[in-house]
Amino acid sequence: MRLSSFARFFLTAGIYLSSECLHTEIIGGREVQPHSRPFMASIQYRGSHICGGVLIHPQWVLTAAHCYSWFPRGRLPTVVLGAHSLSKNEPTKQTFEIKKLIPFSRSPSGFKSHDIMLIKLHSAAELNKYVKLLQLRSKNYIRDGTKCQVTGWGATNPDLLKTSDTLQEVTVTIISRTLCNSQSYYNRKPVITRDMICAGDAKGQKDSCQGDSGGPLVCKGVLHAIVSGGLKCGIANKPGIYTLLTKKYQSWIKSKLAPSESLDQRGDGQTSSKKDGPGGKT
């Protein structure tokens, strides 16, 4: 699970996190051109970045289900859109309270095999050049060896559990499921199922990591998967593990978004008078 440095608070509070879940950084990446990835979402609690996410509908963000485990009971995080720097008071930012969290599996034990979750915002985002959607595509087949980009605010220093202030991106390579399950890789611990995919670098120099969970894996401009986990970071035979957006997950997403889309009368991301809750805060 690739969470932010906010997880350290919970460790000191006595909540258990295995060594397999301790990650440090997006490795071998670079800072992206500011606001060139307008679909990115930062999921935060009390101003601290916890996980990444993808805006797939004006009122819905896609992220990893295991991020749910780090939200204090009864206290929902916020979602920030339109950001490049987490610390700067950028006028492009839109901040939203959350109306609903919908993990694919309600059981915490199911987060490992179905690490995907939808977040419904209290109101629709205002779409502009800084806040845009990354649409789902029906075709999700991806060849082994394909070069893809993973984006996030994960930490950039392997010795410091601190998220990056600016948005980073790294190019990784899709690794076959057979190889990823082999004895020299994960040895089926965990089993990389058909709902999952591995991506990394042959030398272990490029990887997603802590703070990047829930962020997108984009291949040739198409959203194919979201960051889930892996063992440590930047290890050649322990690549990042991603939740693949299979037909099963896409059907589930569409079923949850359908009521929201029925309210979208004008097609510009602004809902009718029935829109939910208070407006987004900038």
Image (cartoon, grey):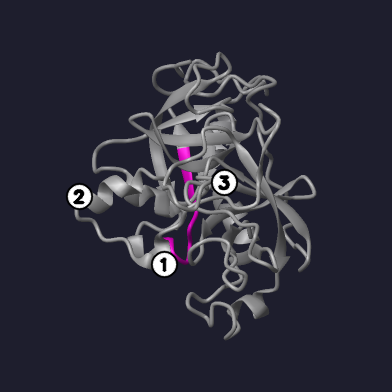
Residue type of the residue flagged with mark 2: Ala
* Residue to which mark 2 is pinned: 13
Residue 139 in the image: state x and y as whole percent. 75, 56
Spatial CA distance of label 1 from label 2 is 19 Å
Residue at the location (57% across, 73% down)?
Answer: 193
Furthest residue toward front: 159
Amino acid carrying label 3: it is: Gly
Q: Which mark is residue 20?
A: 1
Instruction: Measure the C-alpha gap from mark 2 to mark 3.
Output: 26 Å
Q: Which residues are magenta?
A: 111-119
Left/right placement of residue 141 relative to residue 17 reads: right
| Residue 259, horizontal then vertical, whole percent | 52, 36
Image quadrant for the N terminus? bottom left
Counting residues from the N terminus, which is met first, the one under dot 1 or under dot 2? 2
Q: Is residue 42 left or right of residue 203?
A: left
Task: Specify whether residue 220 is painted magenta.
Answer: no
Find the distance from the CA under tag 3 to the CA under tag 1: 19 Å
At horizontal 80% and vertical 49% (from top left) the residue drawn is 220
Q: Residue drawn 37% across and 48% down?
A: 68
Crowding at dot 2, Cα within 10 Å, few <14 / some 14-19 / many 20+, comes out as: few
Q: Are marks 3 and 1 in contact (CB under 8 Å)?
A: no
Which numbered mark, 2 or 3, is in the foreground of this view? Answer: 2
Q: Position of residue 169 (x, y in %)?
A: 66, 44
Which residue was labeled with disc 3?
Answer: 215
